[in-house]
Amino acid sequence: MDRLISLECCVSIFVLIIGISVPMVYILETWYHDRGIISEHKMKLMIGIMSARENFEYRQALRSTWIKDIGAINQVSDNVEYKFVIGSKGCDIHMKNRKDIYSCERLNYFKPRKLQKDEFPFFTTEISESRGVKEEHVAFMYNLSITMRYPIIVKRLGLHLSVHLTRRPITVQIIDASTEQSVLSAKFNTVDGGIVLQDSELGINNYRFQPVHHVLLPKGFEGQLVITCDDNITLSPGLLDFTFMDNTGGTLDFEPIDGKNYPIQSEDLNYFIVPNIIGSIHEEEKFDAELRNSVILDSEHVIHEEHADEELLEEIDLYNDIIFVDVTDVYRNLPRKLLLFHKWVHSDRSVQFVLKTDDDCFLNIIEIMKSLTRGLSARKSWWGNFRENWFVERTGKWAEKHYRSTEYPAFACGSGNIVSNDISEWLASNSEDFFIYQGEDTSMGIWLSALGPSYVQDDNWSCYKDCKENVLTIPQLTVEEIQQYWNTMQTCGKLCSC
Ligand SMILES: *[C@@H]1O[C@H](CO)[C@@H](O)[C@H](O)[C@H]1NC(C)=O
Ligand SMILES: *[C@@H]1O[C@H](CO)[C@@H](O)[C@H](O)[C@H]1NC(C)=O
Ligand SMILES: *[C@@H]1O[C@H](CO)[C@@H](O)[C@H](O)[C@H]1NC(C)=O
């Protein structure tokens, strides 16, 4: 008896709920339908907003502007979700102790071992612990890419003694990577083979040197130290009882490169660097001071970071709209960050489309949803504004050293683009295997070129800051500008001006 009553009760409550909610949903849907926001597809769009840890004001600006529209859209059904994507670790190195502002790599200055006065050879050798390294286990690195981390004055260029001299000269030179012009060069042949500087303590008696005009290589200089010769270079063996030593003082980074300037990726080889440099540190007292100060700066920075961590925790408590991905939060890690976001989407959510944007962009989410409902295929679709034939830069912020082509495959502007779920899933499941190229947008282009997606080109995903009505996104904004676009929209329903 009791059971029957409760059943009856349940049924009537059920009918009541249906009775109220169905017309409600219908009314809301009709209202949104009229405004062009159709919900019958019941699509789910996940928006990932790449954000830096310290960009609290930007996140706040987005929350108080276009993100509010997500709330309105979701009153019909849960169609759209957004998350800020932030690296879980801050960089614990003070900006002044980093190699550049894009990475979290420490400048590892040390006192180089001097030859005479203030001069020091960059590469030295030392008698090996395990004497008699077999020749086939030694790699001779002829060419290097170099990046100056501290200004130095070049005074001599050198060549390893194992290189067999001929009558035709062998040239050691420094080339400026951005202009591709030779900055300095020295020639070695049987007539003038330079001098071997003897300093048993330093162990540079395996190199011959020629003097050059003194040239200052500024901090940030990017170039190549290369050897060229009209003949084939031959080596005289017998000098392999030495271990190669880095004596650069951390004033530069070097990486062996092949004949086409791409990095040679060999890890566990014994190697000798064939060319050499003798130089002196420009303003050495300043260098010494930086060396001493670095520890203090780092400890100050750690305190600053701890404070930032606390603020971030409060922000999470308050808004619950941040996901942390396991990377150090710096520019160079953006590709990894993007992949980990896709991974998160697939471990945690069921969606149809995934949108990527940045925290300095204004998204016209109402327009995006209108266009999306008009039909983007759910199979291998990539909707964005594509850069074609984009030149691969080898120096500066966008330096890409590994991609072996002069142009990137098509990639969508990072201010906003959408992939269908299958693409997102493919990225998620291969995330560990992808090579991480420079930049998240260019990396996406390279990865996805293997998949052959349908590139849905749409200029309305603006790559530039200028505003046009109907654009789906506006990038590179200040916090004030984001607010301004929102105000205009609220005032007259237009984006650019009333
Ligand atoms: C250099 O070596 C290559 C391959 O061993 C050979 O074909 C070429 O003739 C050599 N060039 C000179 C100038 O000796
Ligand atoms: C080193 O660089 C020069 C100049 O770019 C090039 O001609 C030469 O082939 C390179 N050598 C090697 C061993 O890659
Ligand atoms: C850009 O938006 C306008 C207005 O909504 C639309 O008419 C146009 O077709 C869009 N462009 C593309 C390439 O879809």
Image (cartoon, rainbow, N blue to C red):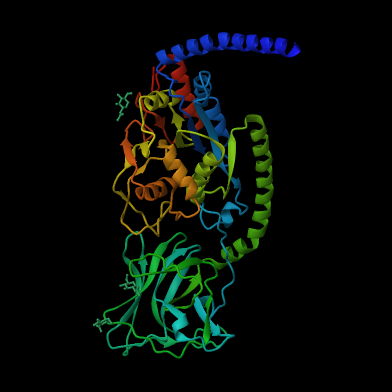
Q: For ligand 3, which image quadrant applies?
A: top left
Q: Is residue 317 left or right of residue 79?
A: right
**Please, is residue 454 above or below residue 21 in the view?**
below
x and y percent of residue 81 in the render? 52, 30
x and y percent of residue 128 in the render? 56, 85
Q: Looking at the figure, which quarter contains the C terminus?
A: top left
**Please, is residue 64 above or below residue 235 in the view?**
above
Q: Is residue 51 visible?
A: no
Residue drawn at 32 percent across, 60 percent down: 179
The residue lying toward the viewer, choosing from 326 and 393, is 326
x and y percent of residue 412 in the render? 37, 41
x and y percent of residue 133 in the render? 51, 86
**Farthest residue, direction front:** 1
**Please, is residue 130 above or below residue 26 in the view?**
below
Residue drawn at 71 percent across, 11 percent down: 4
Q: Quadrant of residue 56?
A: top right
Residue drawn at 50 percent across, 62 percent down: 149
**Farthest residue, direction right:** 2
Q: Quadrant of residue 113?
A: bottom right
Image label count: 0
Q: Is residue 209 visible?
A: yes
**Please, is residue 179 above or below residue 321 in the view?**
below
Q: Is residue 479 left or right of residue 453?
A: right
The residue lying toward the viewer, choosing from 228 and 181, is 228
Q: Is residue 68 left or right of residue 418?
A: right
Q: Looking at the figure, which quarter contains the N terminus?
A: top right
